[in-house]
Image (cartoon, grey):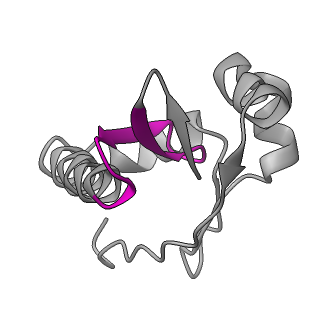
Amino acid sequence: MAFIEDDYHIAYIPVLDLSGYGKSEQEAHNSLAVSLQNYIEYGLNKNTLHKDLIAHGWKIKKKTKPYIAPELTELIKKNEYLHDIVNTKNYSVKRMDVEIPDFA
């Protein structure tokens, strides 16, 4: 999800509540990629990734351990910031595939 606020481009991943920003959309996406990489590395190093994903509403199946992100409609109900973006800003949506290592 990307939008403009106060002359800055914001790239936002609602299912992780992570964002990046920049003077252009590309800068915002690059900043977000760094934030995402740091989030995953930190979670793996501190062994908190699994717990944090659950705290963000992710479902995790025990046998095959796929991570299933929460639905956007559920996030909008729980996240005032996201609710504001969806209801008051012009935004675009880009899909970003993320791979979490099997040992996570």
| Residue 22 included in the magenta stretch of the image | yes
Q: What's the residue at 44%, 40% (across, down)?
A: 10
Q: Position of residue 63 (x, y in %)?
A: 59, 78
Q: In this rendering, is residue 74 above or below 27?
A: above
Instruction: Tell me the magenta residue range.
Output: 8-26
Residue drawn at the location 28% of the way across and 42% of the way down = 23
Q: Residue at x 57, y 73 (%)?
A: 95
Q: Where does the image place residue 35, in percent across and percent down from the top left?
A: 25, 46
Where's residue 57, x and y in %? 67, 42
Tell which of 37 and 53 is nearer to you: 37
Q: Is residue 98 left or right of residue 83?
A: left
Confirm whether the magenta stretch covers residue 39: no
The image quarter containing residue 33 is bottom left
Residue 51 shown left or right of residue 56 in the figure:
left
Can you say whether 58 is above or below 62 in the image?
Answer: above
Question: Could you say where residue 22 lies in the image, as x and y percent from the top left?
Answer: 28, 41
Q: Quadrant of residue 87?
A: top right
Between 65 and 55, the residue placed more toward the observer is 55
6 vs 22, left or right, is: right
Farthest residue, direction front = 7
